[in-house]
Amino acid sequence: MIILKTFHKILIIIILQLLCIQQNMFSQDTLAVATRVNHKNRVAQDTLAVDTTAKHKFKPEPLRATMLAVSFPGLGQIYNRKYWKIPVVYIGFGALVYSAGFNSKNYLLYMKAYQDFTDNIKETNSYLKVISPTIPQKTYDPVVYPNDYILSNYTYFKDGMLRMVDYYKRYRDLSYIGIAGWYLVSILDANVDASLFNYDISNNLNITFVPTQMSLPGGFIGAGISVDLKINF
């Protein structure tokens, strides 16, 4: 009986040890599988976190920007993505076109008035539009009132109309020149803007003036100032 009980105890111990070994093996396998799964997830996450596609950086071509600005005002600024400059371009053109039209209209008005004032035809009296109606016509019109007009008044109005003709003609021509100049400025702006689009103007570029020693004639050394350009990365 003692031997049987001892055998039973040994058998129970062996069975318990076998069960513990199986549990340990299962837990080790589970841990290994979990480790492999976590490792795969970590690799996948790392792979997704890295952006392998390089982002394209816009860099305008100066020649293309110039040709677009030549073809039509404002297209160069649109190509350079400087949309705020488009109203500036067209406000400038609008002001110059208005100035040209205004001066041209008044030039023709005073030119016609001067021609009618100096001819000998009574029916041509467009000069009445530019002379104040409060001034009596008989005091300055030798064609309609040959016996009543005053020569000094006639000369005054004739010279005044001629001056206005020259005045409006001058500013009409300047307005046309301004339109051409503004057109060239818009082209130049598009070209320069495209050339300097990616130019580094950050604080990484510094120009400093520092004192230095300079060699002078005769072997002497004097104080001076040098210019240093520093680029920080």
Image (tube, rainbow, N blue to C red):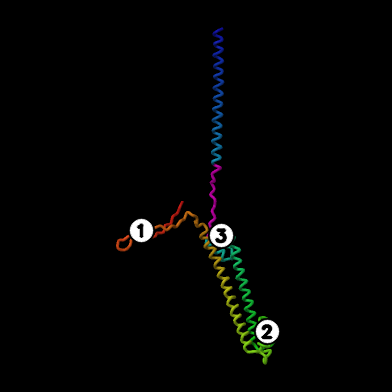
Kindly identify the amino acid type of the residue bearing the numbered disc 3: Asn
Residue placed furthest toward the bottom: 147
Looking at the picture, how far across and down is residue 218, in whole percent?
30, 63
Q: Which residue is mark 3?
A: 80
Is residue 155 shown in magenta?
no
Location of the N terminus by quadrant is top right
Q: Earlier in the sequence, mark 2 or mark 1?
A: 2
Calculate the distance from the C-alpha at mark 2 to the C-alpha at mark 3. 59 Å
Report if the CB atoms under discs 1 and 3 are less than 8 Å apart.
no
Q: Which mark sits nearer the N-terminus, 1 or 3?
A: 3
Could you tell me which secondary element the residue under label 3 belongs to?
loop
Q: Which residue is mark 2?
A: 135
Q: Is residue 135 above or below residue 212?
A: below
Viewer-proximal residue among 166 and 13? 166
Tell me which secondary structure the magenta stretch mostly adopts: loop
Label 2 vs 3, first from the N-terminus: 3
Where, by quadrant of the figure, is residue 39 drawn? Answer: top right
Q: Residue furthest left?
A: 218
Mark 1 Cα-neighbour bin, 10 Å: few <14, some 14–19, many ≥20: few
**Which amino acid type is marked by label 2?**
Ile
**Any mark on residue 169, and which?**
none
Q: Position of residue 145 (x, y in %)?
A: 68, 90
Quarter of the rendering containing residue 219: bottom left
**x 56%, y 18%: residue:** 16
Calculate the distance from the C-alpha at mark 1 to the C-alpha at mark 3. Answer: 46 Å
State the mark number for residue 213.
1
- Residue 17 x/y as whole percent: 54, 19
Q: Amino acid at mark 1?
A: Gln
Q: Which residues are magenta?
A: 47-61
- Element at label 1: strand
Please, what secondary structure does the residue beneath circle 2 have?
A: loop
Residue 61 lies, in percent from the top left, at 53, 59
